[in-house]
Amino acid sequence: MSAIGRKGTYPKGTESVGSEARPYGKDKKNYIADFSNVGEQVDLTAPGVGIISTIPGDLFGIMSGTSMACPAATGMAARLLAQEKNILKMPRNQKRSEAIMQFLAKNLSSMGFAPTFEGNGMLK
């Protein structure tokens, strides 16, 4: 998984501005963060720069990383799968896992980066 950022979407003065780097996607506001995973192992990308998250003490903080992109992708996948009653009714086995992966693969959209940066794209 890689972490995508979008210029102008995180609070001013945060460290997120320092993560802006080439390459840029079809929309020049989108970029793969300078800290992101890249290479053949990347399957998809998700928002991972300047994410408002909870922190200890019932507080909120700005965080960045592929560790922020992963829950964003998981949430998007859950939202998409919630509408797929046929898949959800399947027994929990290898066939269901394969059906989930095939369904999610059909719901990826390229953001305009090479596969080594975005894999097959971002869940839509």
Image: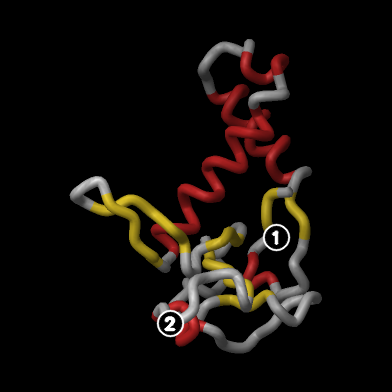
Residue located 49% across and 58% down the image = 69
Q: Element at badge 1?
A: loop
Query: Is residue 48 visible in the rendered structure shown here?
Result: yes
Q: Is 65 or 108 nearer to us in this picture?
A: 65
Eye-nearest disc, 1 or 2: 2
Label 1: few (<14), some (14–19) or many (≥20) C-alpha neighbours in 10 Å: many
Left or right of residue 16: residue 73: right
In the rendered image of this protein, does residue 43 appear above or below residue 85?
below
Q: Is 66 or 116 nearer to us in this picture?
A: 66
In the rendered image of this protein, does residue 18 appear above or below residue 78?
below
In the rendered image of this protein, does residue 6 appear above or below residue 102?
below
What amino acid is at disc 1?
Gly
Residue located 72% across and 22% down the image = 84
Among numbered discs 1 and 2, the one appearing first in the sequence: 2
**Residue carrying label 1:** 121
Image coordinates of residue 48 in percent, x first then y, are 50, 64
* Residue 18 - label: none
Contact between labelled residues 2 and 1, with CB atoms less than 8 Å apart: no
Left or right of residue 3: residue 52: left
Image coordinates of residue 96 in percent, x first then y, are 60, 23
How many badges with numbers are in the image? 2
Residue 43, by quadrant, is: bottom right
What amino acid is at disc 2?
Gly
Residue located 73% across and 48% down the image = 124
The span from disc 1 to disc 2 (Cα, nearest Å) is 29 Å
Image coordinates of residue 8 in percent, x first then y, are 62, 76
Q: Element at badge 2?
A: loop
**Residue carrying label 2:** 13
Residue located 68% across and 50% down the image = 123
Image coordinates of residue 20 in percent, x first then y, are 55, 84
Query: Is residue 34 visible in the rendered structure shown here?
Result: no
